[in-house]
Image: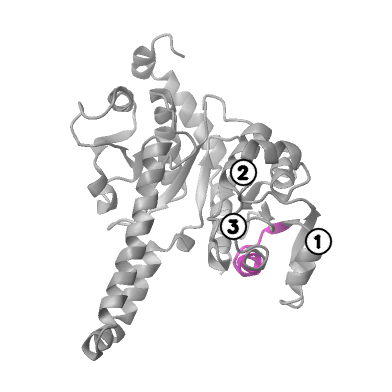
Amino acid sequence: MAFFKNMPFRIGLDISGGDNAPAEVYKGAVLAHKELEHELTLVGVPSEIEDQAAKYPGSLKAFKVVEALEKIEMADSPVTAVRRKRNSSMVVGVNLVKAGKLDAFVSCGNTGALMCAATLITGMIPGVERPGIAVPMPTKKGPCLMIDVGANIDCSPQHLLQYAVMAAVYSRLVMGKSDPRVGILNIGEEESKGTELYKTTYKLLAATRLNFVGNIDAKSIFSGDCDCIVCDGLVGNIALKVAEGCADFIMKSFIGAGSKNVVGMLGLALMKGNLLEFKKNLDYAEYGGAILLGIDGIVIKGHGRSNALAVKNALKVAAQELSQHLTDEIKKSIDETYGDPAVRELLGDSR
């Protein structure tokens, strides 16, 4: 069944970005084409695209191709790469969004470079000072959204306020949460906990019309009691990496312990379905990647290790964001927040 059938969008895909490019990226485009009735544009080296297309006879006619002969590698310095590699797939793709020739762009390449390109080329949403990287996190009650997970490690209370507003809009429109609960990731639940950054942010969020539930500590991330978790990029990145490592450790330890004897192997066999469901809930590929919130356009950052499923889901997320007019809705919510007398009073002359 096709998604958003009556809403044709133009979505670009960086064929050269990611550890598994171009093979898995092209395969992901093929999978997405079966589900999305949108115009998909592959941005990259034409000869590499043609090589991959040969594995799926007839598939190339489903896509448009835009030539970009340079590549931004994972180890490249973000700012330097964006400035010097202007004919790279990533820079060309973001420029197409800025020019209005693409409605959205997806890349699994260098995170810093993509954020830099998106910020410098498309610009920021008015009222948003810095972009934030938001990622869906699995919980007992379905995915929640954590922002920021690495874009900015030196944040102000206003930055976190903007993150909270954007995350709430995304959670409502794309993740289907009618009144998203917004919390601050902190070292305790009390209002007095944390540094001055978090204490001031608490007061700001409490003054907004967001469904603010206060501070949450790290052990509550996966409870499902909070839909949007706000933090600075240092804290968020550590939390994300610990969660990824812990999930991998638990899965491998469980399988390893069960493989030591016949009884354990029988148990694993009987629990195969449950284990697959557990793995699916923790698999980044199911969520389609990270979202760059705050830039004036739709740009999705796929995981560097994205397989075809992850690429397909990232393209689907881009279509969802477009169908819900995400950027326009964020602009509206940012304006409403800063127009709120209670928020303006707390900010004083700082805005």
The earlier-in-sequence mark between 1 and 2 is 1
Residue beneath disc 3: 315
Instruction: Check residue 114 in the rendering and tell me which mark sits there, or answer none.
Output: 2
Q: Residue at x 63, y 31 (%)?
A: 123
Q: Position of residue 76 (x, y in %)?
A: 64, 45
Of 303 and 129, nearer the camera is 303
- Rounded to the nearest whole Å, what is the CA distance between mark 1 and mark 2? 21 Å
Q: Position of residue 125 (x, y in %)?
A: 57, 30
Q: Quadrant of residue 281?
A: bottom left
- Rounded to the nearest whole Å, what is the CA distance between mark 1 and mark 3? 20 Å
Of 272 and 326, nearer the camera is 272
The earlier-in-sequence mark between 2 and 3 is 2
Q: Is residue 85 visible?
A: yes
Instruction: Check residue 46 in the rendering and tell me which mark sits there, or answer none.
Output: 1
Q: Residue at x 46, y 44 (%)?
A: 134
Foreground: disc 2 or disc 3: 2
144 above or below 255? above
Instruction: Check residue 75 in the rendering and tell me which mark sits there, or answer none.
Output: none
